[in-house]
């Protein structure tokens, strides 16, 4: 993407899934094959109640796994501030910043074992725009590694791009690996569109690519 469009606006995910991909991007940059100097990034989500310098924050995670090893300009790295005094205003600010950048060209997504994308948790409805979200216990459990393997230390709230924000990206690449993701991938790809499986919303997007290993793809097509 950056070779064809050096000034691309990239939406990025944290989590275990993209770690190898980010390492490869760092390697390509070190080899002089990937220039990030004109790119901009917007991360999908961040925990509320902690600031970006907290060791458990997604901001710290991204610094460690990507930003430290590429030549992104600091002012072009965009993150939700989970420690903002007014979290609702912070969500509005983020939507405006994405619009001011011209929208997201390529959104990288992981998927939660409960079918979430970003931190859009399954429910009766899904917020369209960037919003505050109450994290499900399963999500807090899945993110415990960032907080000393102690789920009770994972914040209860987060800020996340909305489903509409994600669907507005011009292109989307969802990455999933391992058998733990097989059922949510099956439901997202072969099932009905439902707010109970937020990733199923991607079925309405015209340009989505799924990068799956065999385990994650194993149940596609089953009813
Ligand atoms: C992270 C995010 C989440 C993760 C998902 C999968 O920024 O938005 O939706 O992509 O929880 O996490 P891993 O990759 O750790 O399985």
Image (cartoon, rainbow, N blue to C red):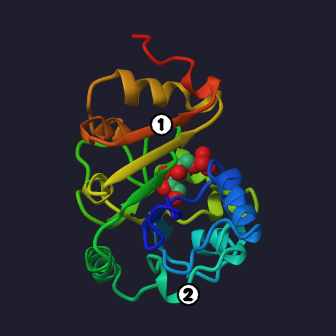
Residue drawn at 26 percent across, 50 percent down: 126
**C-alpha span from label 1 to label 2:** 30 Å
Disc 1 crowd rating (10 Å Cα; few below 14, some 14-19, many 20+) is some
Front position in the image: 177 or 53: 177
Front position in the image: 26 or 35: 35
Q: Which residue is mark 2?
A: 74
Residue drawn at 60 percent across, 73 percent down: 35
Secondary structure under tag 2 reads helix
Estimate the x, y position of residue 193 in percent, counting from the top left.
26, 31
> Does the residue tagged 1 have its C-beta within 8 Å of any atom of ligand 1?
no
- From the viewer's perspective, tell me whether residue 190 is left or right of residue 128: right
Estimate the x, y position of residue 138 in percent, counting from the top left.
54, 44
- From the viewer's perspective, tell me whether residue 66 is left or right of residue 88: right
Estimate the x, y position of residue 89 in percent, counting from the top left.
28, 83
Q: Which residue is mark 1?
A: 210
Based on the displayed image, in which of its 4 quarters is residue 54 positioned?
A: bottom right
Q: Is residue 114 visible?
A: no
Q: Upstream in the sequence, badge 1 or badge 2?
A: 2
Estimate the x, y position of residue 146 in percent, counting from the top left.
69, 62
Residue drawn at 64 percent across, 80 percent down: 71
Secondary structure under tag 1 reads strand
Image position of 85 with respect to 50: above or below: below
Image position of 145 with respect to 56: above or below: above
Based on the displayed image, in which of its 4 quarters is residue 64 positioned?
A: bottom right
Based on the displayed image, in which of its 4 quarters is residue 104 positioned?
A: bottom left
Front position in the image: 56 or 193: 193
Front position in the image: 160 or 1: 1
Disc 2 crowd rating (10 Å Cα; few below 14, some 14-19, many 20+) is few
Residue drawn at 48 percent across, 50 percent down: 109
Circles 1 and 2 in contact, beta carbons < 8 Å: no
């Amino acid at each position: 993407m950056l070779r064809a469009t050096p000034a691309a606006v990239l939406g990025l995910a944290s989590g275990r899934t993209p770690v190898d991909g980010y390492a490869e991007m760092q390697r390509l940059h070190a080899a002089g094959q990937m220039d990030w100097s004109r790119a901009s990034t917007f991360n999908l989500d961040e925990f509320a109640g902690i600031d970006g310098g907290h060791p458990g924050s997604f901001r710290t995670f991204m610094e460690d796994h990507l930003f430290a090893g590429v030549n992104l300009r600091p002012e072009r790295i965009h993150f939700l501030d989970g420690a903002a005094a007014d979290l609702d205003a912070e969500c509005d600010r983020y939507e405006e910043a994405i619009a001011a950048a011209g929208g997201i060209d390529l959104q990288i997504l992981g998927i939660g074992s409960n079918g979430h994308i970003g931190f859009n948790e399954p429910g009766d409805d899904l917020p369209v725009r960037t919003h505050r979200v109450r994290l499900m216990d399963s999500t807090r459990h899945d993110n415990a590694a960032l907080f000393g393997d102690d789920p009770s230390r994972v914040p209860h709230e987060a800020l996340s791009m909305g489903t509409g924000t994600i669907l507005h990206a011009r292109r989307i690449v969802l990455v999933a690996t391992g058998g733990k993701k097989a059922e949510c991938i099956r439901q997202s790809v072969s099932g009905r569109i439902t707010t109970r499986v937020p990733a199923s919303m991607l079925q309405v997007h015209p340009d989505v690519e799924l990068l799956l290993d065999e385990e994650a793809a194993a149940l596609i097509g089953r009813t």
